[in-house]
Image (cartoon, coloured by chain):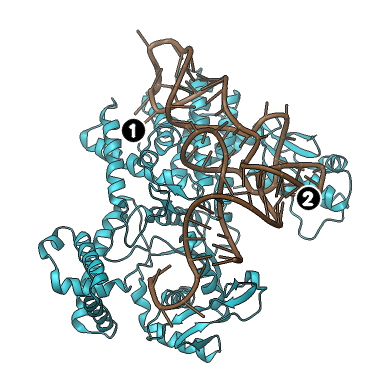
Chain colours: A cyan, B brown
Amino acid sequence: MAPMFRALLTERLQAALATCSLNLPEGFVPAVSLASDSRFGDYQSNAAMVLGKALRCNPRELAGRIAAALQVEDCVSKVSVDGPGFLNFTLAAQALESRVAGLLEDASLGVPKAAQPRRIVIDFSAPNIAKPMHVGHIRSTFIGDALARMARWVGHEVITDNHVGDWGTQFGMILHGWKSGLDAQALAKDPIAELLRIYRTMSSASKTDPALLEACKAELVRLQQGDEENLRIWRECVRLTLEQLQRVYEAVGISFDHYLGESFYNDALGPLVQRLLEQGIATPSDGAVVVFSDGKLPPQEDPFLIAEKDQWKPAPCIVRKSDGGFLYATTDLATIEHRIAQWGAQEIWYVVGAPQQLHFRQVFAVAARLGLRARFVHIAFGSILGPDGRMFKTRSGETVGLLEVLDEAVVRAQREVDGREHGLSEQDRAQVARQIGVGAVKYAELSQNRLTDYQFSWEKMLSLQGNTAPYLMNAYVRTRSIFRKLEQPFDAASATLQLAEPAERALGLKLCQLAEAVHDVLADQRPNLLANYLFELANAYHAFYEACPVLKAEASIRASRLLLCEATSRVLKGGLGLLGIEAPERM
RNA sequence: GCACCCGUAGCUCAACGGAUUAGAGCAUCUGACUACGGAUCAGAAGGUUUCAGGUUCGAAUCCUGACGGGUGCGCCA
């Protein structure tokens, strides 16, 4: 498929610039964007203004020269120079029409494949063993899954890996609790709840009972030394938890290629630290083994330095504790080695909260010194805050369970579905309610800029009105409903697309822009740009639907509009699919 | 103390160097053929983008400094 319009116009602009005998700045690429206002046209470029500044010449005059050199007759009906030197483009109806018609034959919905496919490992979700998933896991899980889907869609080779927390210090408490006060019946009924209970019991009791704390630590040491019984209990905890987690992932339609938890890297940690020492990357310090700054960065940017009273003091990355134990950073380094050596990872994306930023900067820097070459990306996101405006506390404090949120969302969706007439069986209604409920929760997360913190609210998470998943689903359902009304199957081959009405043209233009949205999402890992695009597409469809009757229209117009409906249907369903959201046929 | 993130309409958010009127949704108010599915559409009202400077033809966006909120900073993950 030909490049999307934005990319096409960028190419043409570059070609035009090349003929203008200008002394272009090194690596200059003209920017083309959607017109900020449809009165100006469909696309715009500020290239003349940027160049005008760089080359110290009049931007309007330059824009005029570029416009004269542009060869875009095949796709653009009007080029104009406006304001301080904007180049505005109005697409030719014919180009738009053939492009939209092309969507019907294109399995990738107009999204071009990446020129250079990469092998990308995406690390997301990462729940802890013996703890339920809570709302805090929503962001990593849904953002990671959506990014994985989009990266695959454009042709990257994606490996998803759930780096579960299966080897933390919490196991000291759990092991002791398991041995001293496990309720076998409760465990059978709800394993995670029971594991959480014994953990909390031990955790709070050991705060006032030093002997108990020691006993818990001793259990942990025995586990780490390979004690048979403790290993058996630990494996059982992991198995029981994963079983439960699977149900959550199934409910939200997410799967992983691997579940390599922290424990998988246990045997690699000792040798890794040994190598760090041998290569002079790490040094002993206060009985621990740490990595200090290598002094190659200015102190402001050095992740191993921190300022204190006008002085830069070391903020080392600890890779081995003074008691010989290993840490988060050690495991992460071993994980990087594994992903590069075993999987040939060229990029590793971590969908992990913003508070871990320093940690990753350190880990990536150590990895680089170890000669581990890959593009590391920390896809940070803001925190979900509790009602008090502070972070939900994972460890001690109360939070809202992910399953609880999903269940409530489905219940609310079910009430809506049950209250409507659409000829669905009871079984179908339950299925649709699930799709709506889960979709609403996913969309609430994905439509938001990932970096901003937000306060958890049932209202917001479960809303079915306005800019929500059901709004997009409803647009899709309306497209399907029209086709169910036809007496005969629609013969797309005999129809000709014409974008005559403004609402038709606006919809057609939107339909061509999925590629641009997906491209923008992957450029800086922001799924909300796709959510936003889909909202605008649904909006354009609803507007078209009100303005342009389909079934009652005269034959050739009717056929053309049916094509538009079909294209909308495909792009909406495919776009929602890229967010990990299913679109029901009726609702 | 230092570093990072954030501060936009009553509320929740978008826009991340572009255009006379900074966009949506919710809430409020008006309208729409007893609806090709009204979970819709058209419209009104609502903001000196926390404040003060600066750079720029052009700033919510970049820089500086305040103020306010969050997070992180040697043996948790």
| Mark 1 or 2, nearer chain start | 2
- Reply above or below: A268 against A484: below
A130 on left or right of A47: left
Identify which residue, A201 or A452, lies in the foreground. A201
- Reply above or below: A429 against A175: above
Identify which residue, A190 or A30, lies in the foreground. A190
Q: Report the residue marked by disc 2.
A: A15
Secondary structure, mark 1, is: loop
- Reply above or below: A251 against A244: above
B55 on left or right of A153: right
User: Residue A405 location, x and y as percent?
Assistant: 31, 46
User: Residue A241 location, x and y as percent?
Assistant: 25, 64
B46 on left or right of A71: left
What amino acid is labelled 2 in the image? Ala
Residue A228: assigned label: none
Mark 2 is surrounded, within 10 Å at the Cα level, by few (under 14), some (14 to 19) or many (20 or more) other residues, namely some
Identify which residue, A262 or A354, lies in the foreground. A354
User: Residue B41 location, x and y as percent?
Assistant: 50, 24
What amino acid is labelled 1 in the image? Arg
Secondary structure, mark 2, is: helix
Residue A493 seen in the current view = no
Residue A89, by quadrant, is: top right
- Callouts 1 and 2 in the same chain: yes
The residue at the point 50 percent across, 31 percent down is A539
Q: Report the residue marked by disc 1.
A: A586
The residue at the point 67 percent across, 37 percent down is A35
CA separation, marks 1 and 2? 48 Å
Q: Chain of mark 2?
A: A
Query: Do the CB atoms of the residues marked 1 and 2 lie less than 8 Å apart?
Result: no
